[in-house]
Structure formats: C-alpha cells, structure tokens
Amino acid sequence: MKIKGGLADKRGFSMIEILVVISIIGIISVVATVYVRKSFNQARDSQRLNDIRQLQNALERYANDNNEAGYPEAQELIPGKPLISKDGVETYMKAIPSNPKPRTEGTGGCGDKEYKYTKTANGKSYVIQYCLVQGVSNIPGGDCVAMPTITCVPGIEGGCKCNEISKPCCGYCGEGSTCGGGVLFAKNYRIGGANGSNFDLITPQHPCNFAGNDCSSDFDGAQNRQRWGDLGLVTSANSTNDGSKNTDTLISLNGISAAKDCSNLAHKDFMDWYLPSSEELRLFLTKANDNIGGLRGGISGSPSYWSSTEDSSNQAFVVTFNGSNPVTSRVDKTNTNFVRCIRK
C-alpha cells in the first residue's frame, strides 16, 4: 500500500459511474411504477367487469319478477342505493355499484363517469355503457357495452360493435352500421316532440321478399305488393311519427295486409318489425341507397310504399320514391303498393 502524506490513497466513484447508477435506478423506478399502475388498472377493470356481471344478474331477476314492466327504469339504479321490487319486498341488489376510481388512467381513454344504464322503450332489453381503462385478458381498453346475456362488446364504432347483425343496436352506432337485424338508417329519431323518446331506426340490411319471409334473396324489398286494408273502417292508426304504434293497432284487425306482412316478419332472430309511419318512411326513402336500406337504382317507375298512417276511413298515406324528395300522398286502402319494414 502506498502512503502519501500518511494517508491511504482512497479512490471514489467517478461522475460517470454515479450518473449510470442514477439512470439505472430511474429506469427501474419507471418500470416498477408502470407495472404497478398497470396492475392497479387491471384490478379495477376486473372489478368493473364483476360489477357489470352482478348488476346483470340483478336485472335478470328483476325482469323475471316483472314480466309486464320488464327491466327497471334508469332512475331506479342509483350508485350506492339498493335495487328493490316495486312493492319494496324483494331486494335484487344491496347497492348499485359505483365505477371505481381513478377512472381515467391507462390506455383506454375513459372519462370520469359512472356506469350508464339505459332501458329500451319496450322494457325488454337494456344497455349498460362503461369503460375499461387498461383492458382485461383479451378485452382491450376502451368503451364497452353490456346487454342481456352479453357482458362486454369492446370499443368499436364509439363503444358498440355494430357489425354483429345478430345483436341489438347499441343506440349510438353510426348511420350505415349493421346492427339490430339490419342497417341503421336514422339515429335518434324522436317521437312525440320535446318530451318524446329517441330511437334508432333500422331496416333489414339485405333486400327482403316480405311475403315469403325471405331476407336473403336478391329482391329490392319492393317485390311484395299488398293492399293496406278494407274501405269504410277507421282504425285510429293515424300517427305520422310512430309506425310501431300504428302497426300494433292494425294487426289487431282482420284484413290489414301491409301491416301484417311486417308484423309477421322474422328476420335475423328479430320479430318486432313494423310498417313505418309516413314520416319514418319519408326519412327512410330520403336516406335509402345501396348501403342504407337496400334500395337499388333501376327500379322501374317511381315505386310507392305503404305507410302505416291512416288518413280516413277509405284512404291511407303512401310515400313515393323518386330520389331525394319522396312525395307523400293519399290513396285508397284497397290499392296494392310496395311494403318495406323497419324496427327500432
């Protein structure tokens, strides 16, 4: 050992060595932080899926006990509050789950919001909108929806996997998307003015021969000519906006051929097709093209389609397809005109 000035020659760490060590510690810290955050996000996402499944179970038990009303109203599902029967006897869920926080970290682009539950108009279905921050297993992060028997449809088209024709339309798919047994041709169609309800309107994606209950063959949807009904009978099916309501009225009567064609249609596992009202039909024909509605160019003449809207005891409204400006007119109920069905 060399002695200089009576002290040992002690060497310390160089600046480069110190910086390398600091960098390594920093990298390890970042990796550890990311891993921990990812683990926490996945844990919260797992909790979200568990919340949704438990809520779905409660909703099914509620619907089974309320055959007429179906699923509960949105105001019955308050985070932290119980879901109980109308008479207050049965408790289906002790506390409606709240979306765990934090909600916006990770790759999913989720907002700071609660689970959103929406009941369909007829009460027979629902949609729960929620979001996975990180994603779980093979489910990516992003917007998801839950529907009866379906826990998660990953974030496609703004949260709805619209191209699965056998599943309900999620209510916020884009026009032209295939969903709900057909193609979405009108978003948020409103019935009843400012206090009315919004619906998405759908028509079979493929042209249909409704008389033969065939929606797979190469018809234009106008091959089926029918009479509207009998003369001299006032049916009260006079709504210009709600074809579903009109159709319900008409199918209770004998001899209403056009409405019964749609009411009897079973296509893509959906059986709630109806004859559109005059305004719904105008909207459909305005938007109809090769992608929306299946109407093709080359239809001879200007075909007229029956609406479900009655004008008088002897006449009902038809809408004539002549391009971008469909014309509504009154004709005798015993005339034969084309039939086109839609659903909400």
Image (tube, rainbow, N blue to C red):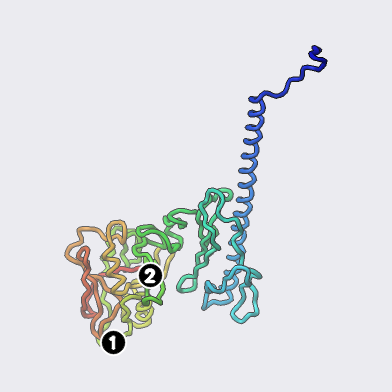
Disc 2 residue type? Trp
Q: Nearer the viewer, residue 62 or 166?
A: 62
The answer to which quarter of the image holds residue 16 is: top right
The answer to which quarter of the image holds residue 83 is: bottom right
Position of 188 relative to 234 (above/below): above
On-image quarter of the N terminus: top right
Which residue is drawn at the image coordinates 29% and 73% (left, top)?
279
Q: Nearer the viewer, residue 211 or 281?
A: 281
Position of 311 relative to 204 (above/below): below
| Label 1 vs 2, first from the N-terminus | 1
Horizontal relation, residue 73 to residue 334: left or right: right
Which residue is drawn at the image coordinates 54% and 76% (left, top)?
67
Horizontal relation, residue 99 to residue 126: left or right: right
Position of 199 relative to 313 (above/below): above
Helix or strand or loop: what does disc 1 sit on?
Answer: loop
Disc 1 residue type? Leu
Which residue in the structure is indicated by mark 2?
273
Which residue is drawn at the image coordinates 63% and 43% (left, top)?
33
Which residue in the structure is indicated by mark 1?
233
Q: Nearer the viewer, residue 297 or 264?
A: 297
Indicate the position of residue 19 as horizontal and vertical percent values: 64, 29
Indicate the position of residue 198 as horizontal and vertical percent values: 40, 70
